[in-house]
Image: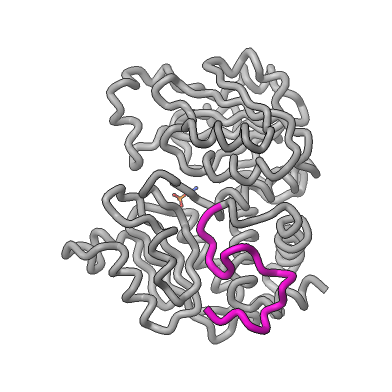
Amino acid sequence: LKSKGINEKVKWDGYPHVLKSQQFDKKWVEDVLFPLANKIEKLFGRKKLRKLLKGKTMASVFASESTRTRASHEIGFTHLGGKVAFSSQNANLSGAMGKGESFKDTLKVFDSYNLDLIVARNDSLKETPIIDIAKGLNTPIINAGDGAGKDKQHPTQALLDLYTIYKHLGKIKGLNIAMIGDLKNGRTVRSLCYLLAKWNINHIYFVAPKALKIGKDILAYLKSKDIKFSEHRNLKTIASKIDVFYQTRTQTNLGSRKDTRLNNLEDITIIDKEILKLGKKTSIIMHPLPCLDEIVRSEVDNDPRAIYINNSNNLPSQLKCGLIIRIALMLLIIAPHKSVKLLG
Ligand code: CP
């Protein structure tokens, strides 16, 4: 990729691809991504925002289900004045892959079509991971969730999660974070751990049934970065210490509800009014969504600490932060000079 002339200030390791959380360092997140996201939030609906990617095109190539990730990239791109030239909700069903084509070949097709950006998701363990496919592509690619291979990642989710924490708590340093649910199959927790390890957080509490524990590779990584962590079965015993409750669902698409060792759904930790009562008044409750039965919505949604869908204290919800961060990332990828100008 030709990167000559691109302002060094806004580049990250592996630029312009967004493939895994390890690419991003603390200084870039704090000095470039978050300030740009804040600017974009203020510019919503303004003409200035809608001109930034005029004439640019993207394709979203999703070989598996998505609502938020696909929609926020596509809608975010149009907020910037760009055009979504192709969108496939499920390339397995409606695209060439239905004929047995590999995801790698499908992405190579789009790479040949002179696009400015490809946003791709693939959950199939049989396919080449997006991280590896990207090495052979010339078009910038965003990994919008990769279930393939050992290093399952969802880096834009991790960046938006971190931004949400920063917006609502004003800091990342020193926090106690509970990662709850299907930690074995969920890629959002994996990607978020890689990012959090770059900050001086206080402690990560992993809360999961035995069959769905966080991978040893993540624990080894945290250890190598001197991040304190512990594993638990019962959220109630630690709830009073937690600043961020990061709840996740059991991954039907990535395998875990089919896991025969998880016979009983009661093994899943639920966030309900009891947890709210035990939790700090200053804590926040996050969920990457979709949310199934792991949050009692009738008891939790209206609490100001629940920020997964609802804005709270005049601050954008986790969902809205997702749109903002993805707009910032796409602008940085396609028009770095305009990003620098916006940053001032
Ligand atoms: N959080 C998330 O990745 O949601 P979608 O599967 O709807 O994109």
Number of dots carrying numbers: 0
Q: Is residue 96 left or right of residue 172?
A: left
Relative to 53, is 97 above or below? Answer: above
Looking at the picture, the colour scheme in use is one colour
Is residue 144 inside the magenta stretch?
Answer: no
Residue farthest to the bottom?
A: 55
* Magenta stretch: dominant secondary structure: loop
Q: Is residue 322 left or right of residue 211?
A: right
Q: Position of residue 100 (x, y in %)?
A: 18, 62
Q: Residue at x 56, y 26 (%)?
A: 206
Residue positioned 68% across, 75% down in the render: 49
| Viewer-proximal residue among 76 and 237 | 237
Q: In this rendering, is residue 79 above or below 254? A: below
Specify the segment rendered in magenta: 1-20
Can residue 303 be seen?
Answer: no
Residue 14 lies within the magenta run: yes
